[in-house]
Image (spheres, rainbow, N blue to C red):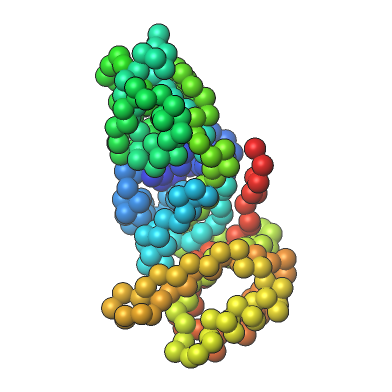
Amino acid sequence: MQVAIQGIRGCFHQIAAFKYFGEREAIDAVECHTFPQLFRSFQKRPDYYGVMAIENTVAGTILPNYAMLRNSEMNIIGEVYLRIQHHLLSIDGQSVEDIQEVHSHPMAILQCQSFLDKHHHLRSVETIDTAWSAKELSEKRPRGRAAIASSLAADYYKLNIVAEGIETNKRNFTRFLVLQHKEFTKSPAKAPTKASLCFHLAHEVGSLAKTLTILSEHGINLTKIQSLPVVGKAWEYFFHLDIEFEDYDGYRKTLEVIQPYINELQILGEYHRGIKHRTI
């Protein structure tokens, strides 16, 4: 099974892929350095699966990914909620006191700022990826340097975990979407319990309020709403919604009811809701 991920082996996207698909040995990660590259990979190989981060409880929503998804031929077939645990990794024989530089992605550095503040001698160096920082450290093996990355990266690149769980917020979770090309997407064996929708509102006062009221009255639980500008149309917006439901047929009928109030409805995916871990 080939799964396109943003990052290289040992990154959190790969951990999310393992969590969703199960068997680690059955997954061949297709490394993509950027999210646009991830989407381009499906143009060459539409039979790929994909895993893409969409939001984080600390950093918020990755807005460009919504637009890329909306304009692609990809379907959301699932989701994964992953707790993000950062570790300080180094080569053999080093302690925190021996390290002068810490390399990692800017977001990982930001999420570990309290740890870095406690160790004033550590200088942060921003890189393109957490796992890439670990790989470079493993290959060059410079003394006095460490990387912030996952335990999977430590395993892959044979690095020591000098300090575990150095993230400031222990309730740091990322939601990942699991993608598949529409050409290969099959209907799930069991009725979906969640959907991701996108629409452009009609030019009518109160149309958003009416739409949300209809969803509520029909037992639809709105879990997220995100607006993005319509390119070329000043002050007009696309709305991305994540909704949950127990009655699939009722949900489909509700979509018919809201049609008069919205334009350009896209169903980006119908899938089973992921398990949210609210505690650690």
Question: In which quadrant of the rendered view does residue 143 lie?
Answer: top left
Camera-nearest residue between 35 and 122: 122
> Is residue 49 or residue 124 the one in the foreground?
124
Q: Is residue 221 left or right of residue 50?
A: right
Query: In the rendered view, does 113 fall on the left or right side of 243?
Result: left
On the image, the x and y values in percent for residue 10 come to 43, 32
Residue at image coords 56%, 52%? 79
Q: Relative to residue 271, is residue 139 depicted above or below?
A: above
Q: Is residue 28 visible?
A: no
The residue at 46%/33% (across/down) is 114
Q: Residue 52 location in percent, x, y? A: 44, 50
Q: Residue at x 36, y 13 (%)?
A: 98
Give the x, y percent position of residue 17: 51, 42
Residue at the location (60% across, 60% down)? 271
Can residue 202 be seen? Answer: yes
* Relative height, residue 26 to residue 81 (above, below): above
User: Between 220 and 250, which is closer to the camera in this rendering?
Assistant: 220
Question: Compared to 216, does 278 lie above or below?
Answer: above
In-image side of 202 versus 214 (left or right): left
For residue 213, above or below residue 180: below
